[in-house]
Image: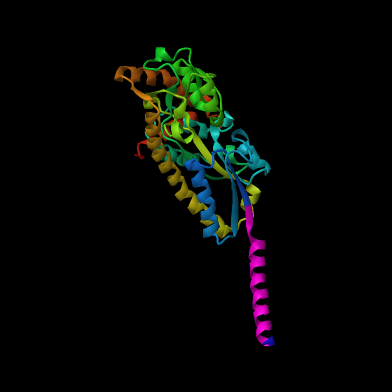
Amino acid sequence: MRKTLFTLTAIALFLFGLTSVACAESVRLTYSSFFPPTHVQSRLAEQWCAEVEARTGKAVIIDFYPGGTLTKAKQTYDGVVEGISDIGQSCLAYSRGRFPVMAAVDLPMGYKNGVQATDVANAVYAKFSPAEFDDVQPMYFHAHGPGLLFTTEKPVRTLADLNGLKIRSTGNSAKLIEALGGTPVAQPMPASYQSLQKGVVDGSVHPMESNKGWKLGEVVRHCTLSDCVGYTTTFFVVMNKDKWAMISPENQQIILQINAEWALKHGQAWDEADAEGKEFLTSKGGDFIELEPAEAERWVKAAQPVLDGYAAGEGKAVDGQAVVDFIKGEMTKSP
C-alpha cells in the first residue's frame, strides 16, 4: 500500500513539475480593443487569442480586454508601444498624420466591400514595409466595406444638400467630407451615437455595419449610397516588440499563419455585418438614396483633390503617387 502511495505521489509530483515548467515558459499577454465585446470584430479578436493559445499549446496565453477597458481607441497604439497592453486593435484614422503610407488605403477609392479593402491594406503594408510601424510588431490589418454618408434629419441627394452639414468623420474621411462641401467633425466611433442623438452633428460617414454594430441605425434616418467615393478605415492589430521577441521563432511562425487567416475572416465579417447593418437600418425606418449617374460623377470629381493631395506629397517618405497607383492595381485583383 505504501509503495503504491509513494508511486502515485511521485507521478503527481512529476506531472506538477512538467506543468510548472510549461507555465514558466508560457508568455502571457494582454490584448486591448476599443470594439465593444458584442461587436463581431471584437468576437473575432477574442477568437484569435484562443486560436493562438491552442496552436501554440498554451505557450502563448492572451487575456482579452474589449470596449476600451484597458486603453481607449486613440491611445491603443501608444499603449502597445509603452507596454500598457501587449497587443492592441484600433484604427489608423485616430492618429491622423502618423501613418502616412498606410493612410492611403483610407482614401475614397470607391471600395466595393470589406474583403477588397482588407486585401488592399495588407498588400500595401507588405509592398512598402513603412517605417511608421517600426516601433511595434504588426500582426495584420483589416478594413471595412465602403464608408457611406448617413444623416439624421436632412436627406442628401446632391452635393448642394451637404453644404453646411456637420458630419462626424475621421482621418481621410474628414478630408472627403470637406472636399464634398460638408463640415467634418472629428470624433471616435464610441462617441458617435450620443453626438448624432443630441444633434451635435447632422450626420456621419461610416460603413453600413455600424448601423447595427454601434446602433447608429437608431439615430440616423437617411443613407446616401455614396459608394462611388467609398472610403475605408484601416484597422491594425499590433504587438509590443519586446513581447514579440519573447515568443519562440516556432510559435512566431504559427502566429503569422493565424494572422493571414484572421485578416480574411475580418474582411468577410465586415461584409456580413454590412448586410446586417442595412437590414437593421431598414427595420428602424431608414431610407436609402441612390445618386443619379451624373450626380455620382460630380461626387467623384469633387473627391479627386483628396487623392491628388495625397499623391502630391502626403506620402512623405514614400512616393504618394506610387502608393495610389499600387492600390488601384490591387483593387482590380479583389472581388
Q: Tell me: residue 47, above or below residue 145.
A: below
Q: Which residues are magenta?
A: 3-28
Q: Quadrant of the N terminus?
A: bottom right
Q: Main secondary structure of the magenta part?
A: helix
Identify which residue is drawn at 49% across, 40% down: 39
Q: How is the image coloured?
A: rainbow
Number of marks present in the image shown: 0
Q: Tell me: residue 24, above or below residue 149.
A: below
Please state the horizontal and vertical placement of residue 91, each as a whole percent of the image: 54, 35
Identify which residue is drawn at 42% across, 21% down: 304
Please state the horizontal and vertical placement of residue 110, each as a whole percent of the image: 39, 29
Identify which residue, 272 or 248, lies in the foreground: 272
Report if residue 15 lies within the magenta region.
Answer: yes
Residue at the extreme left of the image, as rendered: 293
Report if residue 105 lies within the magenta region.
Answer: no
Please state the horizontal and vertical placement of residue 251, each as a whole percent of the image: 56, 58
Identify which residue, 82 or 13, lies in the foreground: 13
Query: Looking at the rendering, which quadrant does residue 134 occupy?
Result: top right
Identify which residue, 224 or 146, lies in the foreground: 224
Identify which residue, 331 or 204, lies in the foreground: 204
Q: Quadrant of the C terminus?
A: top left
